[in-house]
Amino acid sequence: TRRRPATKRFKKCLLDKHGHLLVAWRKDMDTNGDGRLSFTEICTACSRMGYVGDVLELWKELDIDDEGGVTLDELDHGTARLVENFREFVAELGGPSAAFETLDVDGNLSLTREEFVSECLSHGFVSEGSVHDLTG
């Protein structure tokens, strides 16, 4: 495994601000939702979050495949797997609308964090030991 000190510092900055890498990815990084960050987007995210490290070093570490863009998988494989597993879980429940209806057990057309976690546990999406991965 390749050492990535700038990435480690950057991830700490993301976690300090957002508490979870996925929240950081969605709110401060992949703001256009295309699943890929350009160098400009990385620079903007670094500025917005107060990252003071070497942005070019960070870019070189993150752009693992050297294709000129950074994916969530390149930032954090575990978080990317969580997203992919959730997509599969939603598909198994019949798609987004059906999944929402399944998880909204009280039928009030909203999900609290507690309700979401409880239903993900009861449907086997996560285990007690991995709830933190889901909720940050």
Image (spheres, rainbow, N blue to C red):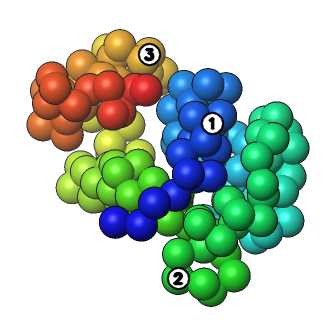
Question: Residue 18 appears at what percent x and percent y?
Answer: 62, 28
Q: Mark 2 = which residue?
A: 65
Mark 2 or 3: the one toward you: 2
Q: Is residue 110 visible?
A: yes
Q: CA distance from mark 1 to mark 2?
A: 22 Å
Q: CA distance from mark 1 to mark 3?
A: 24 Å
For the residue marked with disc 3, what is the amino acid?
A: Thr
Q: Earlier in the sequence, mark 2 or mark 3?
A: 2
**Residue 34 visible in the snapshot:** no
Count of marks, rendered view = 3
* Residue that numbered label 3 is attached to: 112
What residue is shown at x 33% (from left), y 33% (from top)? 133
Q: Picture quarter containing residue 19?
A: top right
Q: Closer to the N terminus: mark 1 or mark 3?
A: 1
Q: In the displayed image of the protein, which residue is found farthest to the bottom?
A: 67
Q: Secondary structure at mark 2?
A: loop
Residue located at (77% from left, 40% from top): 51
Disc number at residue 113?
Answer: none
Residue 119 higher or lower than 96, as above or below: above
Q: Look at the picture and state if 122 lies above or below 28.
A: above
Q: CA distance from mark 2 to mark 3?
A: 38 Å
Q: Circle 1 — which element?
A: helix
Q: Position of residue 84 (x, y in %)?
A: 35, 59
Q: Quadrant of residue 30?
A: bottom right
User: Who is closer to the viewer here, 98 or 11?
Assistant: 11
The amino acid pointed to by label 1 is Leu
Seen from the viewer's position, the closer of residues 2 and 68 is 2
Label 1 with label 3: CB-CB less than 8 Å: no
